[in-house]
Amino acid sequence: MSTWTWIVIVVAALIVLAIVLWGMRKGRERRLESKREEASNLRQQAETKAQRAEHRASVADELSQRASVERQEAQVTARRADEVDPDVDD
């Protein structure tokens, strides 16, 4: 084989190698971008769930406070009933 044939083969091999490496790089970039999007979606879901949980905790605290107030009112009313009832011994 002549020298120019070897040069053409080497250049063609280098071009093929460059195309393969470029394709691998693009594939890796696509996978990374896909994972970034997935992570972003998961973070968004986590934020939504955290906000929902915070809201529910706030509502639960408010209900707990209301229940405590109502319990105290019931105790006051029960004491008053005991004071009014002539059959209850002090």
Image: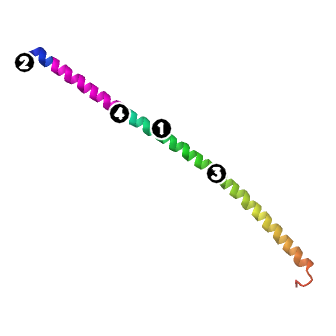
Question: Which residue is the extreme one toward the left?
Answer: 1
Q: Which residue is mark 4?
A: 27
Give the residues in magenta. Answer: 8-28
Circle 4 residues within 10 Å: few <14, some 14–19, many ≥20: few
Q: How many callouts does the rendering have?
A: 4
The kind of residue on which mark 4 rests is: Gly
Q: Quadrant of the C terminus?
A: bottom right
Q: Which residue is mark 1?
A: 37
Q: Nearer the viewer, mark 3 or mark 2?
A: 2
User: Which mark is drawn over residue 1?
Assistant: 2
Q: Nearer the viewer, mark 3 or mark 4?
A: 4
Q: Quadrant of residue 57?
A: bottom right
What is the CA distance from the residue labelled 4 to the residue labelled 2? 37 Å
What is the CA distance from the residue labelled 3 to the residue labelled 2? 77 Å
Q: Which residue is mark 3?
A: 54
Disc 1 is placed on an element classified as helix
Residue 71: x percent and y percent? 78, 68
